[in-house]
Amino acid sequence: MVLAPPTPPPLSTTEIQDAARGENSSSQTAIAQETQTSGNNGPDTYHLRFPFIVEAVSASDYPKVIQIAEEVDLTAVGNNQTSRLLIIAPLVLAYLILDQSPPARYALARLSESHATHPLSKLLATLLNVTTNRNHSKVYATAATLVELISQPGFFDQDLAMVLTKLTTVFIERFRLRTFELLSRAYNSLTMAQAENYLGVPSETILAEASKNGWEYDSTSQILKPRAFSQKSNNTTNFSSLSTFAFVADSVGRLEA
Amino acid sequence: MAPTDPTQVMDTILQQVTTADSLIAVANFLKNMNPKDLREAALASPLSTGQDPLLLLSIPQNTLTVLYILTARLGVNNGQAAPTFETLENFCRTFDPEQARLSPDRVTLLAKGIQRLAVSTNNPRSAILPLHFLVTRYAPDPSYLTTIHPIFTVTCLQATHPSAALPVLNNPITSIDTNLSDLTYNDNLIYHYTGGVALAMLKRWAEAEEFFEICVSAPGAVPAALQLEALKKLKLVQLIAKGKTAPLPKYTNQLLLRHFKATPYHQFVNAYPHNVEALREILSKERNLFQSEKNVGLLRQALDRAPRWALKKLTATYLSLNLADIGKAVRISDEGEVRALLLDMIESGDISAAISADGSVTFSDPPPQFTRAQVDEVLKNVQEQSELLDYLEKEMARSKDFLSKAIKGRDDTVGFIGADEDVFSQIAPHGAGIWGIDD
């Protein structure tokens, strides 16, 4: 029974980390031991639902990935199986693809202490932090490190590795595109070195993309001049002409009433 | 002689509920069974044959009975084991809301029992889905506040899962019916306070501000402690989102503001955003207090965002500046940091500016960005809100309390505080205006 005002939960990164550290910790040895024993118990809910996440990732339906992962996270029993990372890791990356950092942060915060210290979780947390802080060069570097980690032969689940590789690649593409659009809006002119730092690709790639989007480049001063990124305007709206007529007629009718 | 063995009593209950004439009869029978402790023990027991009565009952058809059994099992320590979350979720997905509304107190017990069970098993997450189904299916429509609402939001926070609360928080509360749910004053406060916390965790500042304001401005003879906590968070959220605080609604209890002014939060608000050293000093000096009230996160975010409000003020005065001058004005020495701040503000739409390679920054008015479909959507939304407001106004105008106060006010020739002058002015000499009759 709730009799008193609830204690507010931690809101900042530091508070979340402090709260997570307050739980009883178990070492990575425990994870390894658990990984060895989990095979004896057969597939758990996380394993059973993971193929649905694979399907959604294959269809590039990232909101669906989030929906499935969140539902599994709510219904599955048990916090300490490593298999929980089958759900949480894709969930975090899907949120990052959609540029929704806060729910990604809390998805990681819900991991037990033993999973929070797993190298995969730590890298995801780092990626989340540098993305939130828009530390562009570190975003690309951390993503590369993540891909390197999951590509190792000893990674604990090869199917998960494939899914995470795809999600990380998509995330970097989308992040780069969003950054490119931002540079088009925010800069009248910038140096090639700055562009390389923001976009994490070599100058040749930048020049190719820049010329496609109408940017100018002065090779002497190595200055790029962005052109305002015009979003492809969607002239088709959800309202057909008949619907618009109905809407206008209805509005007039209400005014007359 | 009446049986005293719980299993035999359960046999009787099952026989009665499955042969009753109507649902009202079932509700009355279950509610009025005495003694109460024997009733609860019986409901938590198997039948005399050892069979689980739930196996013989259909949730949609026997919602009331199943509700009583589940709440008894959640509340009684001996007898049947507590129901599993699968059972609870299944009930919450498939129960008949109309039947459940015949016993609102039992629904409240169920919600509390689910929450308590989850906390006792150290897994608050498992209560979220059952409570979600319960809160979304019980009331006739999502605008009604029920006792389940605060239990649900508190559970989401306990599980560190604020996004799970969003589908419920997205429906504003406009209806209260104490026949539907045995609400208390605190339910409204707790729901809007915890809802505000969940939204603040997700950095949905405008919505968080609205929820905290509803909590703060809830009318009452004396302010509640929770309202003061909500006021502190409200002010911080306003600083984060807009760089300044906004006046509270005029019906807010003035004592609250007086209490707030005695706190270090008031000093923080006054020093914001320009006096960054003073802000840091307050944060450092009162750290223990802020930590105990779990507001350090919000305070730090407000402090981190202080330079952007100083920068935004520059755009009102200058057409262009260079990075070094901007850095001096906002007291950031590193040009890279200034550049990053500008980029962040341009990305979030706080300012419209363009940076050049030579370090100069040109400010401009933000270009309008909306489509025809967005305008139509806004117009449709306004029409719906206007209709709802019209309906609520008429409902209030025909309520007994309002009519008696309005006539008393007119007789005393004293306007009452907070009166809606438009509604009051509709009252013609013989009250005809209320009925829409023109004189």
Image (tube, helix red, strand yellow):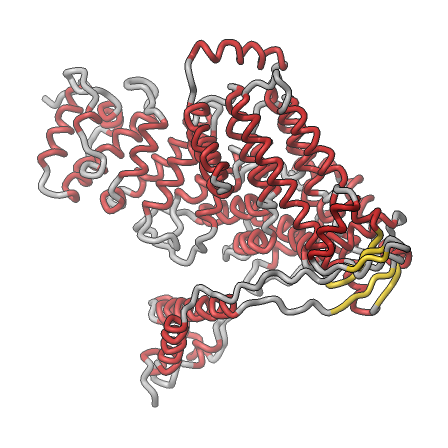
The residue lying toward the viewer, choosing from B112 and B37, is: B112
Q: What x and y, as percent, mark residue A118?
A: 63, 21
Whether residue B203 appears in this view of the structure is yes
- Looking at the image, residue A94 sits to the left or right of residue A144; the answer is left
Q: What x and y, as percent, mark residue A222?
A: 87, 53
Quadrant location of the C terminus of chain B in the rendered image: bottom left
Whether residue B329 appears in this view of the structure is no
Q: Residue at x 77, y 61 (%)?
A: B312
- Looking at the image, residue B174 sits to the left or right of residue A146; the answer is left
Q: Which residue is drawn at 44% across and 40% down?
A: B152
The residue lying toward the viewer, choosing from A192 and B17, is: A192
Q: What x and y, as percent, mark residue B426?
A: 41, 81
- Looking at the image, residue B91 sits to the left or right of residue B202; the answer is left
Quadrant location of the N terminus of chain B in the rendered image: top left
The residue lying toward the viewer, choosing from B81 and B343, is: B343
- Total numbered badges shown on the rendered structure: 0
Q: What x and y, as percent, mark residue B305?
A: 74, 50
Q: In this view, does B35 lie above or below B46?
A: below
Q: Residue at x 43, y 79 (%)?
A: B410
Q: Residue at x 90, y 55 (%)?
A: A221
